[in-house]
Amino acid sequence: MSQPPLRFRPHHFLCALGFEGKGYSPEFTANMAMIVMDRLRAPGGEAVEIMVQDSADDICAPCPSRRGEGCESAQRIAQLDAAHSRAMGIAPGDRLNWGAALDRMRALPDDALERICAPCQWLQYGMCAAALKRLKNGA
């Protein structure tokens, strides 16, 4: 039996790509690992369907910053989502599989993260940049 589609905010595509086992809390990290490692990076993960949305999603579920369907950093998150939506050509309500999302991330310009991820506190650690480089190099 197939699983329901994952629900992602636009900026969570690159978060999933760059995930290296770190997060905001143990619960958040465990949830992210389940989504990324057990579904997206597992054999057949490219077929996993994802529905884009503009409110709290499957990754946000245990986040300590979550406030109902929003976030205590709502303005920063909205800025990230808008930039990622434009860069990847996605919008709330869209459905695509992880393979198609990888293709869209692979097509991002080399300097995309500096622009679209500028407000993200994780950018400075280079995880997403390294993951995007590996993706573009075919790894």
Image (cartoon, grey):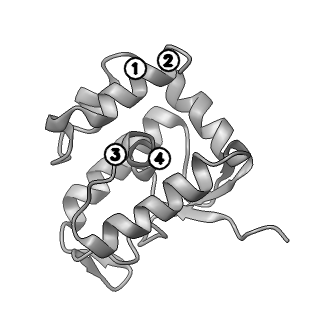
- From the viewer's perspective, is the residue at label 1 or at label 3 nearer? 3
| Label placed on residue 20 | 3
Which one is earlier in the sequence, the residue at label 2 or at label 3? Answer: 3
Dot 2 and dot 3 residues touching (CB under 8 Å)? no
| Image position, residue 103 (x, y; %) | 61, 29
Q: Are marks 1 and 3 in contact (CB under 8 Å)?
A: no
**Amino acid found under the numbered disc labelled 3:** Glu
Left of 114 or right of it: where is 83? right
* Secondary structure beneath label 1: helix
Element assignment for label 3: loop
Q: Which residue is the site of mark 1?
A: 133
Are the two marked residues, 2 and 1, in contact with CB atoms closer than 8 angstroms? yes
Q: Nearer the viewer, mark 4 or mark 2?
A: 2
Check contact, mark 4 vs mark 2: CB within 8 A. no
Which residue is denoted by mark 4 in the rendering?
13
Q: Residue at x 35, y 78 (%)?
A: 62
Tell me how far mark 2 sits from mark 3, CA to CA: 18 Å
Which residue appears at 27% of the width and 51% of the height?
79
Give the number of the disc on residue 136.
Answer: 2
Q: CA distance from mark 4 to mark 2?
A: 15 Å
- Residue 19 drawn at (x, y percent): 37, 46
In which quadrant of the rendered view does residue 100 lie?
top right
- Asked if marks 4 and 1 touch (Cβ < 8 Å), the reply is no
- Indicate the amino acid at tag 1: Lys
* Kind of residue at disc 4: Phe
